[in-house]
Image (cartoon, rainbow, N blue to C red):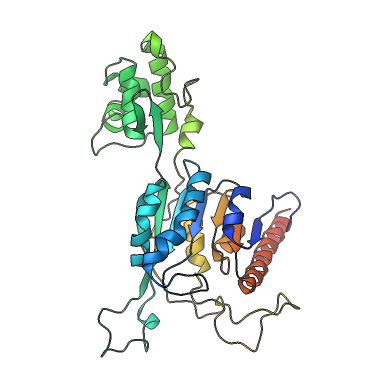
């Protein structure tokens, strides 16, 4: 769907996402809600032991497409995530934190036989945030950002304490940006640009340019800031999200009629999807790590909740779904979300 004056808000691939990755724009964030190893959908694995093989081609594709600032939200069970975690690390992802969805007692009420269960009932699933592991090529080989900053300053042959003068601070530059202990901070772009300028003006003649990522020129403030993932903080939110599974009007029922794609089948009262995610949760994740106009990938669309949230927030969504019934439901939701953006744009105009 196209909106005049606004870039295409979503792209829906009907089929296996492995055939779509190469045609998609580089993602700002990826929201993965694929196999859990619980036979939750056709194509899911029957146990967690097969999850690594299931996710491997996707991890390779994500690694290839991601920018240094790309983030990944990985939805799964606790054991499913723990099983896949080493694979994600091997393909360039660094753990940031775990979000726990507490579904409450209503999720298990009536579904547990106290005489046969051999564990505490499960009322949670997790969504784990990852950032890209960023390494910088240096004369001594690839270095982390922390080591590279100090390496470049020392390569210039300037005493460490003069970094404070370079940045215009009393002691923060040496203590925060060039230290190698646990007090290290990722410096803002403006400070890295100041370090580079000072090193180029006062460092050894043979080493210029200093603080260069390409060997041709020093990194600029904007270039440096673009290497780190965005974070838009919301006060009051923690890493535990409490909400019962969807049972309200947001929960889609049954299937859709092909002859009337925007009318739900009234003959079916069952849920269209066993594990539909709340739009509220998807909006939280997208707002936290992206800005309007950014690209959101949803490789395993289902009902396309992440993409619907992305479109409604003014981001551009790339989503794939292999099941024809889910494709139909997903596109209806995406059309509605895009129409809402158009209506809002017309009101502003």
Image spot of residue 174 (x, y percent): 28, 27
Image spot of residue 153 (x, y percent): 33, 21
Residue at horizontal 52 percent and vertical 48 percent from the top: 28
160 left or right of 130 in image: left
Residue at horizontal 48 percent and vertical 74 percent from the top: 275
192 left or right of 315 in image: left
Residue at the extreme top of the image, as rendered: 205
Residue 137, picture quadrant: top left
25 is higher (above) or lower (below) than 323:
above
Residue at horizontal 63 percent and vertical 74 percent from the top: 325
- Please name whichever residue, 47 or 315, is drawn nearer the observer in this view of the structure: 47
Residue 9 seen in render:
yes
332 left or right of 112 in image: right
Residue 348, picture quadrant: bottom right
Image spot of residue 120 (x, y percent): 27, 78
Residue 163, picture quadrant: top left
- Quadrant holding the N terminus: bottom right
141 is higher (above) or lower (below) than 105:
above
Residue 238 seen in render:
no
- Please name whichever residue, 286 or 167, is drawn nearer the observer in this view of the structure: 286
Image spot of residue 226 (x, y percent): 49, 37
39 is higher (above) or lower (below) than 190:
below
């Amino acid at each position: 769907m196209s909106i005049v004056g606004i870039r295409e808000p979503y792209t829906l691939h009907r089929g296996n996402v492995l055939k779509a990755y190469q045609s998609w724009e580089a993602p700002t964030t990826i929201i993965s809600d694929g196999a859990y190893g619980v036979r939750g959908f056709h194509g899911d694995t029957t146990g967690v032991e097969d999850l690594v093989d299931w996710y491997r081609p996707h991890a390779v594709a994500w690694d290839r497409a991601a920018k240094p600032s790309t983030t990944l939200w990985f939805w799964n069970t606790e054991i499913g995530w723990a099983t896949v975690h080493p694979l994600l690390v091997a393909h360039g992802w660094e753990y940031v934190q775990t979000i726990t969805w507490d579904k409450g007692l209503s999720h298990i009420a009536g579904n547990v036989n106290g005489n046969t269960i051999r564990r505490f009932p499960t009322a949670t699933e997790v969504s784990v945030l990852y950032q890209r592991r960023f390494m910088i090529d240096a004369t001594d080989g690839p270095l982390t950002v922390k080591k590279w900053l100090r390496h470049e300053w020392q390569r210039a042959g300037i005493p460490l304490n003069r970094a404070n003068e370079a940045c215009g601070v009393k002691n923060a530059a040496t203590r925060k940006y060039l230290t190698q202990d646990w007090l290290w901070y990722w410096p803002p772009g403006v400070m890295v640009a100041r370090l580079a300028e000072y090193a180029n003006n006062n460092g050894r003649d043979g080493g210029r340019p200093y603080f260069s990522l390409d060997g041709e020129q020093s990194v600029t403030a904007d270039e440096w800031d673009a290497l780190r993932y965005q974070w838009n903080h919301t006060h009051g939110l923690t890493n535990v999200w409490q909400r019962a599974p969807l049972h309200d009007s947001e929960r889609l029922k049954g299937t859709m009629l092909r002859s009337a794609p925007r009318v739900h089948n009234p003959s079916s009262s069952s849920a269209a999807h066993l594990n539909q995610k709340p739009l509220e949760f998807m909006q939280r994740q997208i707002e936290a790590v992206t800005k309007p106009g950014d690209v959101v990938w949803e490789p395993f669309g289902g009902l396309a909740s992440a993409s619907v949230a992305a479109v409604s927030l003014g981001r551009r969504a790339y989503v794939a779904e292999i099941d024809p019934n889910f494709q139909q439901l997903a596109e209806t939701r995406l059309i509605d979300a895009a129409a809402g953006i158009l209506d809002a744009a017309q009101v502003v105009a």
